[in-house]
Amino acid sequence: MEITEEKKLMAKAGSAYSHAWRIMWDNFISLFLVALIIIVAATPYAITARIEDFSDHFGIMAIALVMGQIFTMVYTLFVMSPLSYGSNWVYLKAVRKEKFEVQDLFDVFRNYINVLLAALLSGAIIVFGFFFLIIPGIIFACRLAFVPYLVMDKRLDAVKAVEESWRLTKGHGWRILWMGLIAFFVFILGLVCLVFGAIVSAMWISAAFASFYQAVLAEKGEDVIPVVENGEKA
């Protein structure tokens, strides 16, 4: 008789990436469409870059550069950051085996102001940390990695989300850093396979971080839906 051992999703990089790989392929079409929406939303970045290149031929590069930078900052805060939070929300639902649809990506706009404040606050803290020899910025980035999930999942305000992320990631900072390093090489590997590979690698990374968040909640007994790696609910 064949005996299979149920392996729990654990707050470790290997477990998170392993679980994320299966989650990604189980929900590939929906998650791929989410990724395409994010890519389409990011096209203004490319347009801005082309305008800057074009303006260089007319000797107004300085003005175009300043305007491009202002546009990039505004567009990132008001459009791309909220969509990133919405994407994280979709991936978290997938990890939890909850029913979800592609349009759940836009649930973020129901909590838009709070998302903007959370993105602005966490981003400011991380940037501030990078001014101090980079290392504090890396630490802040790791400890605030759960802010998007907490804003969408727990509906916490910006300050509470930062505080809660700091609490939940205590003792997991090195693991989150390790996950980030793995993500870097996964994405580089994806780029080798051109556009499709880059998209798939980004999907895998997103699913891995959502899995890690869920695993930490389970570890602390605060999870909503216990998840195991064979896809069943406990």
Image (spheres, grey):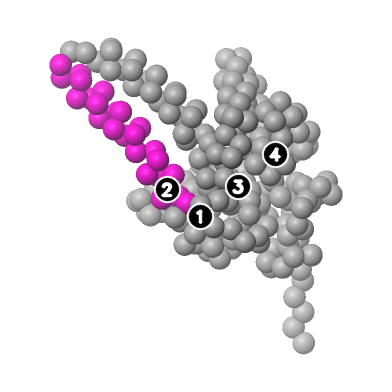
| Quadrant in which the N terminus appears | bottom right
Identify which amino acid the numbered label 2 is placed on: Ile
Q: Amino acid at mark 1?
A: Val
Q: Local crowd at mark 2 within 10 Å, few (<14), some, or many (≥20)?
A: some
The three-letter code of the residue at mark 3 reads Trp
Spot occupied by residue 133 in the image (x, y as percentages of width and height): 59, 16
- The magenta stretch is 34-58
Left or right for 1, reference 84:
right
Dots 2, 4 in contact, CB < 8 A: no
C-alpha distance separating marks 2 and 4: 24 Å
Q: Taking 39 as reference, is 55 left or right? A: left
Ranked by sequence position, the earlier of labels 1 and 2 is: 2
Q: Residues within 10 Å of mark 4 (few under 14, many from 20)?
A: some
User: Of circles 2 and 4, which is in front?
Assistant: 4
Q: CA distance from mark 1 to mark 2?
A: 9 Å
Secondary structure at numbered mark 2: helix
Where is mark 4, residue-wise?
A: 155
Q: Is residue 4 above or below residue 129?
A: below
Residue 144's image quarter? Answer: top right
Q: Is tag 2's residue or tag 4's residue first in the polypeptide sequence?
A: 2
Of the numbered discs 4 and 3, the one sitting upstream in the chain is 3
Magenta region, main secondary structure: helix
Q: Residues within 10 Å of mark 1 (few under 14, many from 20)?
A: some
User: Of all residues shown, which one is farthest toward the left?
Assistant: 58
Label at residue 37 = 2
Kind of residue sitting beneath label 4:
Arg
Say which label, 4 or 1, has the lower sequence index: 1
Q: Secondary structure at mark 4?
A: loop
Q: Residue at x 68, y 44 (%)?
A: 153
